[in-house]
Amino acid sequence: MTAVPQLILSGGVTLQALLSVPPSPRGLVLFVHGSGSSRFSPRNQAVAAGLNRAGLATLLFDLLTSAEAERDRIDASLRFRIDLFRGRLLDSLSWLAAQPALAPLLPVGLFGASSGAAVALQAAAERPDAVAAVVSRGGRPDLAGEALAGELAPTLLIVGGEDEAVLRLNREAATSLHGFHRLEVVPGASHLFEEPGALELVARLACDWFLRHLPCSGLEAGPRPIPSVPPDPGPACPDVLRFRGTD
């Protein structure tokens, strides 16, 4: 599927984005990348492709402009500006709401990776009308701070079993979530889910979560057991990509 470039205005800057809309979409997922990454994150793109195959539209956007990203590569001064990124994510949600062709797909799901998970959780707490579900991949929900207590959207925290420090942080953060949530540990996986089959399982779990909790997905919403070993994806989440590489 060909992703269509988009431009999102936020606080006087223009953010680059990639929008993919499959035929008869069943919902829309907005990706929030982690520090030092971009809309071209190969792992997020791999997961997004799996969601597209399941009928979910996706939007991957840059949290920084090209000039800001270059500055951050030099001095790392922007990569943990959660407050800045939250504002840009909120502006992106407003941009989506202003697109007539996408309005039927709202509210959206948010997929946050690493520090992007904290940004997604803060935005979900601030805009419960705009966010129907959240998935975190190797995320840092602890960076969301007090917003965790106010985040009520169904939330799936996916962490590698070998990513011990992040797993501990996710377990602690989960105690502050008051909405329906689940912590899913991928056995044998490290922080980047480089191991064979690990990223496949992330995509499968995310696909299942969004199809269950996005209101226009056509599936019945509500709590549902999530397998801890890779199942047959079945017709709902087909053709999840196999991928290895750096994020």
Image (tube, rainbow, N blue to C red):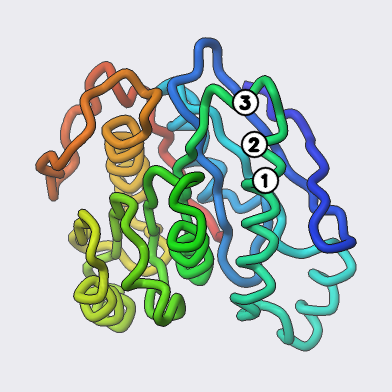
Q: What residue type is labelled 1?
A: Ser
Q: Distance between the residues labelled 1 and 3?
A: 12 Å
Mark 2 crowd level (few <14, some 14–19, many ≥20, 10 Å Cα): some
Where is residue 120 shown, x and y percent of the image? 49, 60
CB of mark 1 within 8 Å of CB of mark 2?
Answer: yes
Q: In this view, does 143 lie above or below 19?
A: below
Residue 200 vs residue 222: left or right? right
- Between label 1 and label 3, give the one nearer the viewer: 1
In the displayed structure, does residue 27 sit left or right of residue 221?
right
Q: Which residue is drawn at 63% across and 56% down?
A: 90
Image point 79% across, 35% down: which residue? 5
Judged from this view, the residue extending furthest toward the top is 24
Q: Please name the residue that numbered disc 1 is placed on.
A: 94
Using the image, tell me which numbered label, if any, was put on residue 205. none
Residue at the spot of label 2: 97
Apparent side of residue 64 relative to residue 59 in the rendered image (left or right): right
Q: Name the residue under label 3.
A: 102
Task: Estimate how packed mark 3 is, as few (under 14), some (14 to 19) or many (20 or more) residues with alpha carbons within 10 Å.
Answer: some
Q: How far apart are marks 2 and 3 (CA)?
A: 7 Å
Where residue 89 sits: x, y (%)?
Answer: 63, 57
